[in-house]
Image (tube, rainbow, N blue to C red):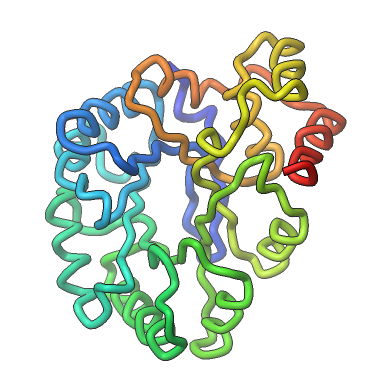
Amino acid sequence: MTDPSDVPAVSLADGVDMPMIGLGTWKLTGGQVEAAAGAALAAGYRHIDTAVMYGNEAEIGTALGASGLAREEVFLTTKVRPSDLGQEEAVLRRSLRALRTAYVDLWLVHWPPQRPNQRRQLWNEVRRLRDEGLARAIGVSNYELSQIDELEEWTGERPVVNQIRWSPARYDPDVLVGHKARGVVLEGYSALKDSSLTDPVVTEIAKSHGVSPARVILRWHLEHGVPAIPKSARPERIAENIDLFGFALTQDEVARIDSLGALA
């Protein structure tokens, strides 16, 4: 088990702290996701990511209840779909009932609505429900930086998080710097799915540290200050994916992994 206190947290722009490693749950459903969430919490995870679209909020709520952990010990993220425009409050309240909680720690717009007026309307409703106490922090997912700038221009408030696909193959320093310049945390998903765990650069670095290539990829995220939410249903992999704090990458190793983005 990893001691939860060893997992660093990133402070979001509104003062909410988010653990930098969480369990992703896309495509995990039923008993599988309940078991995965339970294994994650037992392994030291205190951050679980879900979404209305995943159809697994109730099972995650069950796992949370069975864990014996206090609600404030676990950082919960869920997401609203653009198709939920106009019924955001009802959708969020259903999520809260399923998750067995009075609030979520982070509520994200899952992907940007197609039309500018829809993006503005949805963001305003997300802000309103945050102000009512149903979410501690709010953000977006799969947004371009220009779309984040739109939200700030329209409402005076930018998201505190943008959750996007991120891996060495997708590394783009301009995207990373652009988020940091705006005070928006870039949170990465599909870190392992989009990575080659047999890449010679990654395997060489892994061998030098005596760890798996997957752990190198996830540690690379942390070296860049990027939270990651790796997904697995296997308890041993779940435990491995958070076991990242007995080693660190050198600046040269980080740069070598960065260079994989230029080759993709």
Picture coordinates of residue 213, whole percent (x, y):
62, 20
- Which residue is depicted at the point 72% across and 67% down? 181
Residue at horizontal 33 percent and vertical 60 percent from the top = 79
Relative side of 142 to 197, left or right: left
Q: Nearer the viewer, residue 6 or 238?
A: 238
Which quarter of the figure has residue 227? top right
Q: Quadrant of residue 72?
A: top left
Question: Measured from the top left, where is residue 172 in percent x and y?
Answer: 73, 53
Q: Quadrant of the N terminus?
A: top left
**Snapshot quadrant of residue 82:** bottom left
Q: Name the spot of residue 83 as percent of width and height, x first.
A: 27, 73
Vertical side of 39 occupied by 25: above or below:
below
Near-viewer residue (165 or 126):
165
Relative height, residue 50 to residue 213 (above, below): below
**Image-based side of 173 in relation to 20, left or right:** right
Residue 62: give x, y in percent of width and height: 14, 37
Give the tally of numbered discs. 0
